[in-house]
Image (tube, helix red, strand yellow):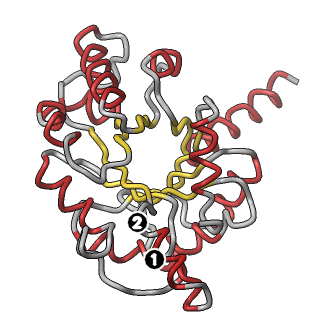
Amino acid sequence: MDINNLEKFLQKIKDGKCPIGAIIMFSDPSVTELAAETGFDFVFIDGEHGELDRQTAMQHMMAVRGTDCASLYRVPDSSHTEIKKVIDFGPAGIIVPMVMNAEQAAAAIAAMRYPPVGNRGCGFRRGLGYGARDVEQYWEASRHEPLTILQIEHIDAVRNLDSILALPGLDSILVGPYDLSASMDKHGQWDDPELCAVYDEVARKTKAAGVLLGAALGGDYAAWKRRGVDYMAIKGDDGAMIDGFRHAMKQFKEA
């Protein structure tokens, strides 16, 4: 849909480009608008951590309308209720964190599609222009929107990856590199051979399944490019602010 720029996001991937994104945790939607104006291809709006509520989530999605930036929203968990709270706002994709097995994955996928494929409830809100848009066009778009993005961020999920990838309706696997490293007691040890082998395995299987591969704040960008990552969130709003403040102070002190 044009309100979420999903088509632009997917076209960049088809053109062989790797869309880059900003992770948004601050509640002020002007942060998302600024990320879009800066040139990010997508925003990863984080409803799992931080203080974002339902109304604020919609405002963040609205902030990218009229730009080329796609809106991906991370729900707190894989439950039908949490997905239902935001899916009618019309995000380009919904990110489901800490998916551990095929049962959780199947439940999340079902919550994102209307019957008979899934069990999404009919709540025609922003995605349908509050009723002003053509219902049949919306219904057709809902067959493949929003993107169903499942996060693999625990070693137990890696062990169950084959059964997760076999599920119909899965659009993307998004690796959470830091949580995955922590689950192996290798916090942020990006060069660790065992950890790298796990990242390689996830990437290889995901690509072989014809599923989009994403990563978030993975440390070694070059390694993820070699793995064939299709899109990547490279910076959080808090980290960007810290870096900017430190750079400004450094410049002043050096002057």
* Location of residue 53 with respect to 238 vertically, above or below: below
Residue 127 lies, in percent from the top left, at 53, 77
- Residue at image location 26% in from the left, 14% down from the top: 197
Please, what is the three-letter code of the amino acid marked with disc 2? Answer: Arg
Residue 240: image quadrant is top right
Q: Residue at 30% across / 82% down in the picture? A: 121
Report x, y in % for residue 229. 47, 28
Is the Cβ of the residue at disc 1 closer than 8 Å to that at disc 2?
A: yes
Q: Secondary structure at mark 1?
A: helix
Q: Residue furthest top?
A: 193
- The disc at residue 211 is none
Residue at image location 43% in from the left, 66% down from the top: 51
* Number of callouts: 2
Q: As drawn, which residue projects farthest toward the bottom?
A: 131
Query: Which dot marks residue 143?
Result: 2
- Which quadrant of the figure contains the C terminus? top right
Q: Is residue 191 above or below residue 238?
A: above
Who is closer to the viewer here, 10 or 225?
10
From the viewer's perspective, is 110 left or right of 159? Answer: right
As drawn, the label of residue 139 is 1
Residue 84 position in % (x across, y down): 33, 76
